[in-house]
Amino acid sequence: MEFIFKQWQDVMKFQQCLSEHAKSSWYHETLFQNEKHFILMTHIDELDHEQAKNIMKEFLLFQKRADWARGILEDQFFYSEEEEQGEILAIVHEMLSGEREELTSLLEPMDDAYVIEEALSSIFDQSDAISFDSFIRFRLKKYMERMVQYVELAIDEYKMEQEYQAFTNMLREYLGRKDPKINVIHLLFEQEPFFYTERFEMMTRQEIMAMLDKRLLTNHPVYIDSYTLAPLLSMAPNVIFIYTDHKDHGLIRTILKIFEERVCILSKSEFWEEKKSFEENASAQ
């Protein structure tokens, strides 16, 4: 069986995949239409078509998709800076690994492995040498369009993450310039956030609004949560006890990112235990 490649790097990577399956192979260079090509060969009696298809599928899924994403990023979107590339490609990898469903759900459903397997079935039914680059160009055209969509989504997500990072850095600097108006806040997350003082006395909305720095909402009306984040920044407490059963909620992560070591996260049940314990101690004195 013969495979024709234009890129030497592809020959090396595919040969590595073959060797991982204990399949021997060799290659030689040739010129075709004044272009260098590489012909990789492996014994047909050592490698049936079904196994060859599975190895090629593995090669495409775990080796070439990363190459395609990088190529799309450079050639179509002109990202050449290594650090930016790394961060965007990390997001692409997370999507391909099924870790970013909030992003992939924005695309039409597609089983990547199935699409590639179907395309491979058509070429392994023929007896001629398999041109890798022609296969990508013609048989995987639809999937390459999908790869462009992955990269586009990753770029959008990267830009949002950069904006979010700049936003939290700005608020952290704002907090660093503030003197605390209150020492401790207990913040209970139910259907809405409830603020309690150090003595577990619930703060009214009027009390909270009286402490609010209105400039936060004037300068950043879209990004600042007026019910939770703006009051916390305005009060600038030394310690924030957050009681929640959803530690990974976006707002909780933002509070942690801004207030850092000032935050202690506990479960909602612990709030009532702490409140009861405080009230019992207070009444005993």
Image (cartoon, rainbow, N blue to C red):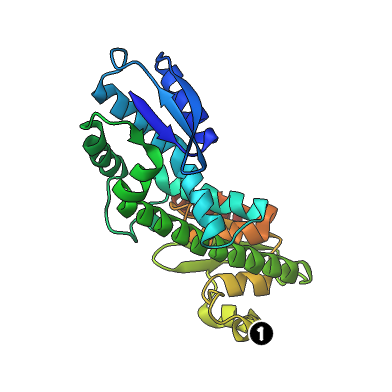
Q: Alpha-carbon neighbours of circle 1 within 10 Å: few (<14), some, or many (≥20)?
A: few
Q: Secondary structure at mark 1?
A: helix
Residue in the picture at 30% in, 41% down: 116
Q: Nearer the viewer, residue 39 or 19?
A: 39
**Does any portion of residue 273 appear in the rendered image?**
no
- Looking at the image, residue 48 sits to the left or right of residue 150; the answer is left
Q: Looking at the image, how many numbered discs can be counted on the residues?
A: 1
Compared across the picture, whether 128 is left or right of 132 comes to left
Q: Position of residue 224 (x, y in %)?
A: 56, 75
The quadrant where residue 214 appears = bottom right
The residue that disc 1 covers is 215
- Residue 78 versus residue 24 in the image, above or below: below
Looking at the rendered structure, the kind of residue marked 1 is: Arg
Q: Is residue 112 visible?
A: yes
Which residue does the image show at 51% across and 75% down from the upper left?
227
Residue 186 x, y percent position in the rendering: 57, 61
Horizontal and vertical percent position of residue 104: 36, 55
Residue 75 is left or right of residue 213, and the answer is left
Residue farthest along the front direction in this orientation: 33
Of residues 38 and 88, the one nearer the viewer is 38
* Image quadrant occupied by the N terminus: top left
Quadrant location of the C terminus in the rendered image:
bottom right
Seen at 27% across and 45% down, the residue is 111
| Nearer to the camera, 121 or 198 | 121
Reply above or below: 263 against 216.
above
Quarter where residue 53 is shown: top left
The answer to whether 164 appears left or right of 171 in the picture is left
- Nearer to me, 33 or 101: 33
